Amino acid sequence: MRIAIGLVILCDLIIRASSLTAHYTQDGVLPVSLLLEFDSKPLRWSFHFLNDSFAYQSLLFVLNGLIALLLIAGWRTRIITILSWVFIVSLQNRNSFIQQSGDDLIRLVLFWAMFMPWGKFYSLDAKRNKTSSKNYFSMASFGYLLLIVSVYLFSSIQKTSPEWRSEFTALYYALSLDQLKIGIGDWLYQFPTLMKIITFLVFYYFELLVPLLLLIPFKNLKFRAICVFSIIIFHIGISLNLYVGLFSAIGISSALGLLPSSVMDWFDKKVVNSKQQFSSAFFKIRTSAVPQITRNSFLALIMGFCVFYNLGFVKSFRYALDDRAAYLTNLLKLEQYWGMFSPHVYKTDGWYIYRGIQSDNSIWDIYRDQGGLDYTKPKDIDKMYPTDRWRKFAENYEKNNYNFMRPYYCKYLIKEWNKKHPENKIDGLYIMFMMEESLPDYKTAPIKQQNTCLCYENEPAK
């Protein structure tokens, strides 16, 4: 799991770095001053806030990448895991408008990993300190187990709509979202009955059964192995049908720590070609009584807090965390939401039209790079976004409660267009969103045009 998580972090940094100017600097869509003015939270911290110049942000990305490499190698793993968690929290706090639930998962896995010995095998640390067993149990490992259980259990609990529980049309509506549907999804979308069967299996046999099997106290090694391989198959299926970035890779990587030690013994024997077997007994990290009690008490508190936090999203749960809980949530960034496509699947999506305004008031479509405007629906809407980070940003950009970002994105597009097209500059830009609502039986409602932003290059963003 350590190696897989490190590789995912590295891939994520490369993807994020491709839009470093746009998403993390003062010349992009969300300057630090704007973020702190409109989206400030008590005790939310990030050393990415200190300076939003390209050079400073690039330095932080490089340091984060080096830490990820050391995590993969397993060098001074405990310290490196702490640094990795710190850098991930800082990075995610810098721009929360391009985040997805997979980011919550990888951050929380790193949190529990700070208290677990995941550097004992397949690492540089392992060469110095040999361990006699792969079996390990502690308050931290139970917290990690509870995290994985929470992801799928609370996801199923929050799916309360008929699309999930009686009509079984959730997958139909998910694949009706053109910004998400990719690959096999285009083929699967032709078979409504098959989509209903898959929806039924996902809800009743995967998201409900997997968490329960993980918590069964007897023969749990077999059940855990079944669960891990089920999670792997589930996330491969998602990645083949939906444009969700690294979400599936994070889901698979995060579950690898649940693999029974017997499976890893087989891996050592068949793949690593090691004759030594390690799964005979449990091992413990030796610490004195007072630090151990303090640590376990703290981790038990965090576990209870996370469970209560998730229960807050369940409509039938009558209690809620006090507002002061936000201080702990933001300080340790414990926020999490496992309600993908919950309580129902979004039925509206669409595409943007970018109406460039030139100095002679002529119109230039800067997306299609042609004169005039073409209102027809693009063939592949998902290809309008170079990465899932941009797709998520576009999804949030359309929402009215994020309208403070609109002029900054608008002016960023003008600047980028004029930089790449000095012979065909634009003075202003009018961004429109063409909203399409999915209806039953492959029908759609009439397209609605929403005017999101009009800005000019020489006017201040407001």
Image: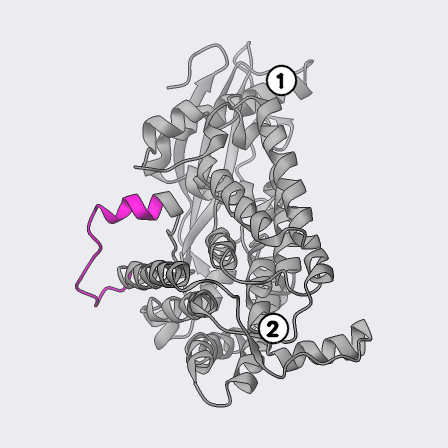
Pointer 2: residues within 10 angstroms few (<14), some, or many (20+)?
few
The residue carrying mark 2 is 233
Residue 78 pos. (x, y %): 57, 53
Instruction: Choose the circle earlier in sequence order: 1 or 2.
Output: 2
- The answer to which of 96 and 258 lies nearer the viewer is 258
Disc 1 from disc 2: Cα separation:
45 Å
The residue carrying mark 1 is 418
Span colored in magenta: 313-330
- The answer to which of 87 and 320 lies nearer the viewer is 87
Secondary structure of the residue carrying numbered label 2 = helix
Q: Is residue 275 above or below residue 183?
A: below
| Residue 394 in sight here | no
Direction from residue 94 to residue 241 in the image, left or right:
right
Residue drawn at point x = 59 percent, y = 79 percent: 260
Residue drawn at point x = 63 percent, y = 76 percent: 133
* Residue 111 shown in magenta: no
- The answer to which of 315 and 460 lies nearer the viewer is 315
Quarter of the image that includes the C terminus:
top left
| Residue 297 in sight here | yes
Q: Is residue 13 above or below residue 101?
A: above
Quadrant in the picture for residue 417: top right
